[in-house]
Image (cartoon, rainbow, N blue to C red):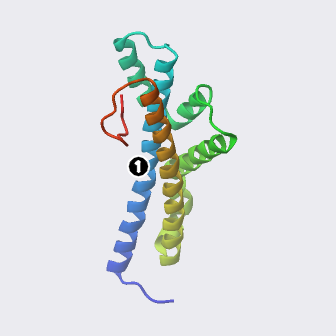
Amino acid sequence: MKSVGLQGIEQQSKELFAYFGLAVYYSQALEQQLTNLLMLMKLSKGEVPSEEELTELYRRKLSSSLGQLVNEIRHHFPFTEEETLLLKEVWKQRNYIVHDYFKERIKETFTPDGRARMIRELTAFRDQAQELEQKLQRYTNELYVKLGLENDQPGVSNPL
């Protein structure tokens, strides 16, 4: 196996932590889209009559965990079975990455092969979370249009 100098190790470690950051970022983007979709679902059902109530509900939803949002959205939005399974899988993986990933994998961070393997796993999670977030964004935009709300900027992650 090829020896990696201290600079190489530092660079690979930075890269590993960058991929970890991207994984967490996309899980938060997913949380934001779930919040947006929940809010629009409530608006579409007339469940939030005043602007003050809407603002307060939005604030509360933003502080909800991914698990709380996943459990709630399933009761309000007609996801396919595949989408529901994907939501649950991303939720489970997100919790593992945020709470246990480095505790359980610390030894792997000290080898080039271990770091490369971790980067591949984090990249796979990021891609899965990003794909799901984009799908939810499309649902949010469709509902936004259906409700007759103006949306001048396609792909805006916070349409409310």
Q: Relative to residue 32, is residue 101 drawn left or right?
A: right
Q: Which residue is drawn at 43% across and 35% down?
A: 141
Q: For the residue marked with disc 1, what is the amino acid?
A: Tyr
- Estimate the x, y position of residue 98 in percent, counting from the top left: 49, 49
Q: How crowded is mark 1: few (under 14 residues within 10 Å), some or many (20 or more)?
A: some
Q: Could you tell me residue 132's position as x and y percent?
A: 52, 47
Q: Is mark 1 on a helix, strand or loop?
A: helix
* The one of 45 and 15 positioned closer to us in this rendering: 45
Query: Exactly how many numbered labels are in the figure?
Result: 1
- Residue at 42% across, 43% down: 29
Does 73 appear above or below 46? below
Q: Residue at x 38, y 10 (%)?
A: 50
* 151 in relation to 103, above or below: above
- Rendering coords of residue 66 (x, y %): 52, 37
Instruction: Find disc 1 in the rendering and name its residue.
Output: 25
Q: Looking at the image, can residue 35 be seen?
A: no
Q: Is residue 152 above or below residue 11?
A: above
Q: Which residue is drawn at 38% across and 67% down?
A: 15
Residue 155 falls left or right of residue 105: left
Residue 111 visible in this rendered orientation of the protein? yes
The answer to which of 4 and 126 lies nearer the viewer is 126
- x then y, percent, for residue 39: 45, 25
